[in-house]
Structure formats: C-alpha cells, structure tokens
Image (tube, helix red, strand yellow):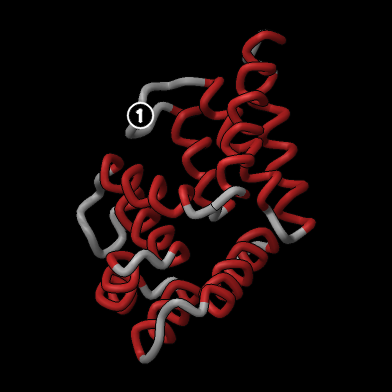
C-alpha cells in the first residue's frame, strides 16, 4: 500500500469508528474488510450498513461498484451510493464524485461539477494530508474552467455548506 492509500484506509476506519451509527458484527466486519481490501468479506456487512445510511459503508459499496470488486462493475450504482454518502458530508465521497465528473465515468464530464465536489471535499476533510490532496486536485480541475465557472462552483459549494450546517 502507498502512503496515500494508508492515509485513506486510516480515514475510512476512523470514519467507521466515529460514525457510531452501527452496532455489532457488521460494523466491525465492514471496517476491517474495507481496510484489508477483502472485498468478498466486505460485500454483506458493508451493503447492510450502507442500506442503514452509514456514510463510510456507502462509500465502500460505491467503491466496490465503481471497480467491480466482488460485485458487478456499475458506475451508476457507484454514483448513487457516493451521492448518498456525500449528502451526509462525507468528504471522500465528494472527492470521488468530483473525480467521476472530471473523468466522465457514470456521469457526464463536467469540470465545473468536478470542482464543486472536490472543493467540498477539501472543505470537509478533517485530516490535513487529505485536505491538501483534495486542494491540489481541485486546483488541477480549476485549470479547465473560466473564472466565471470557478466562481459559480464556489457559490454552489458555499450554498451546500450553509444548508449542511443548518441541519
């Protein structure tokens, strides 16, 4: 595993612990299997937790669908699960949605929406290394936008954050 992968794995595991929403074996099994990249073991417990609304599990299920890991590859399902996790303020899901918009996998290619999601990921990230990584990615996406498009994406990000904080 690379250093970046280790940081992301640590954040995913910490997110499972911090969410506190799930109880029992599924919670532990999903977290351990995701960190170990044992996708066959992750399918059942992570899917059950995702259905219960646990954002880190939704992110994991989306990742599995995006890459076809022990489930059929399906970018539309990945977008669906990442959207659910992002709506809960899960930074990694916003980053991944941004990547999909930037690359056009499962959604139309849209650099403005990529910037919007990656900007939110950077704002929501709690780990400095992840925040820096997301900021670098956002700045790369900005190179494809006009100043007006950047301003619009920033306005959208600010509006989302205000609504999220008001919950």
The residue shown at (57%, 37%) is 160
Q: Is residue 106 left or right of residue 118?
A: left
Q: Quadrant of residue 105?
A: top left
Question: Where 22 sits versus 97, above or below?
Answer: below
Q: Is residue 24 left or right of residue 153?
A: left
Residue furthest out toward the bottom: 24
Residue furthest out toward the front: 166
Query: Residue 93's x, y, as percent?
Result: 50, 50
Q: Quadrant of residue 57?
A: bottom left
The N terminus lies in which quarter of the figure?
bottom right
Question: Nearest the camera: 6 or 28?
Answer: 28
Question: Where 156 sits versus 162, above or below?
Answer: above
Query: Residue 75's x, y, as percent?
Result: 30, 41
Residue assigned mark 1: 107
The residue shown at (34%, 48%) is 66
Query: Residue 16's x, y, as percent?
Result: 51, 75
Question: Nearest the camera: 17 or 41?
Answer: 17
Q: What crowding class fits label 1: few (fewer than 14 Cα within 10 Å), some (14-19), or many (20 or more)?
A: some
Query: Residue 15's x, y, as percent?
Result: 56, 70
Q: Quadrant of residue 53?
A: bottom left
Tell how many labels: 1
Question: Nearest the camera: 129 or 150?
Answer: 150
The residue shown at (45%, 62%) is 55
| Element at label 1 | loop
The residue shown at (56%, 41%) is 163
Question: Where 93 sits versus 47, above or below?
Answer: above
């Amino acid at each position: 595993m690379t250093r970046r992968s280790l940081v992301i794995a640590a954040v995913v595991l910490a997110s499972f612990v911090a969410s506190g929403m799930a109880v029992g074996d599924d919670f532990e099994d999903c977290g351990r299997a995701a960190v170990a990249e044992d996708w066959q073991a992750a399918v059942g417990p992570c899917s059950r937790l995702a259905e219960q609304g646990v954002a880190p599990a939704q992110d994991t299920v989306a990742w599995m669908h995006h890459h076809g890991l022990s489930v059929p590859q399906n970018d539309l399902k990945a977008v669906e699960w990442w959207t659910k996790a992002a709506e809960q303020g899960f930074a990694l899901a916003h980053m991944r949605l941004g990547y999909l918009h930037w690359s056009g996998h499962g959604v139309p290619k849209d650099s403005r929406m990529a910037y919007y999601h990656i900007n939110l990921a950077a704002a929501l990230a709690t780990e400095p290394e992840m925040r820096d990584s997301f900021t670098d990615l956002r700045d790369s996406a900005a190179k494809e936008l006009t100043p007006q498009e950047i301003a619009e994406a920033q306005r959208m990000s600010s509006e989302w954050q205000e609504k999220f904080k008001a919950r």
